[in-house]
Image (cartoon, rainbow, N blue to C red):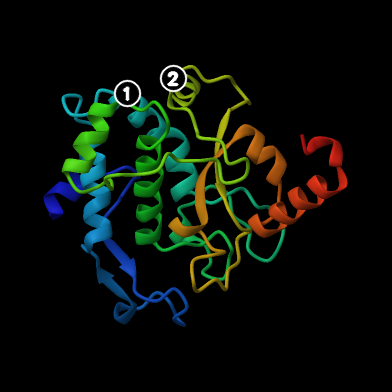
Amino acid sequence: MLKEFFNNTVVPYEMPVDYIDRFASPIHTAQNVDLFLNDEIKDCITMRRFIRDTRRNPASKVFQTILADKIKVKTYLTDRALTGDYKTNREKRWEAHPNSVQYALRRSCMKIETKLLLQIATFEGCDIGLVHNLQHDGLLSDPFEYCKCPITGDNIQYNEFADDALHPTHGKSKFQVGHLNPLKASDTDGANGHTADNISWISENGNRIQGSLSIDEVNALLKRIYQNRPELHD
């Protein structure tokens, strides 16, 4: 498994070593570091190997392009935050201060990567052959539901996504990776941190509507708009 890991790295100096407890103080001690080769790590490496296999994945170019660009940046690197107590600027998330909202364990980031790649396979119109291969490998459930924008509820269309990935327009993208709820450094249940449970592909319209709101705040806003605008009920 170690050989497979090192043959399928994504970020520089990547290795399956991680902190055991993010909140340990001090964090950087021999007692708080371990080797992690659990199922989540194995699934991530299996997924990386799969997307590069042009025989089993006809959409390999799309997947590799989006992994090397948007997924890698959003998953593994911090946002640019030049104010506040903990400034960050595109360093690896596990290198940020553990009290920063940008911090995440390495294995949490790898789980996010796997989720975002698998979500692409559930976009409406994705190649059925690669879908069947992922199901055969136990990486994708059978049956599955199409991936929807969590804000608008629209099915995300694979062909639009692929075109946007392969023919990008500078400064503009129809699809974003977004946190469903604002990041919180003290998050322990995954609902408000940089975790797989709190991240998803979001459409351009969904991203515009959400802004800096949480999912609950978005839902409350949409309900209020609907109630205040009876002319829209038809």
Q: Which of the labelled discs sits on residue 61, or is there none?
A: 1
In the image, 164 versus 154, the foreground residue is 154
Q: Residues within 10 Å of mark 1 (few under 14, many from 20)?
A: some
Give above or below for 225 relative to 66: below
Residue drawn at x 64%, y 40% as measured from the top left? 207
**Comes first in the chain, label 1 or label 2:** 1
x%, y% of residue 36?
24, 65
Does dot 1 land on a helix, a strand or a loop? helix
Q: Relative to 169, say whether 92 is above or below.
A: below
Q: Which residue is located at x 35 percent, y 36 percent?
A: 121
Q: Residues within 10 Å of mark 2 (few under 14, many from 20)?
A: few
Give the residue type at disc 2. Answer: Leu
Q: Quadrant of residue 231?
A: top right
**Amino acid type at mark 1:** Lys
- Can you give x and y, in whole percent of width and height, for residue 96 in the image? 51, 61
> Which residue has dot 2 on it?
166
Which image quadrant for residue 133?
A: top left
| Relative height, residue 220 to residue 152 (above, below) | below
> Residue at the location (58% across, 28% down)?
174
Visible in this render: residue 195? no
| Relative horizontal placement of residue 81, taking residue 10 as reference (left or right) | right
User: At numbered mark 2, what does the secondary structure look like: helix, strand or loop?
Assistant: helix
Disc 1 to disc 2: CB gap under 8 Å:
yes
State left or right for residue 150 relative to residue 15.
Answer: right
> Furthest residue to the front?
234
Give residue 183's position: percent from left, percent from top: 60, 61
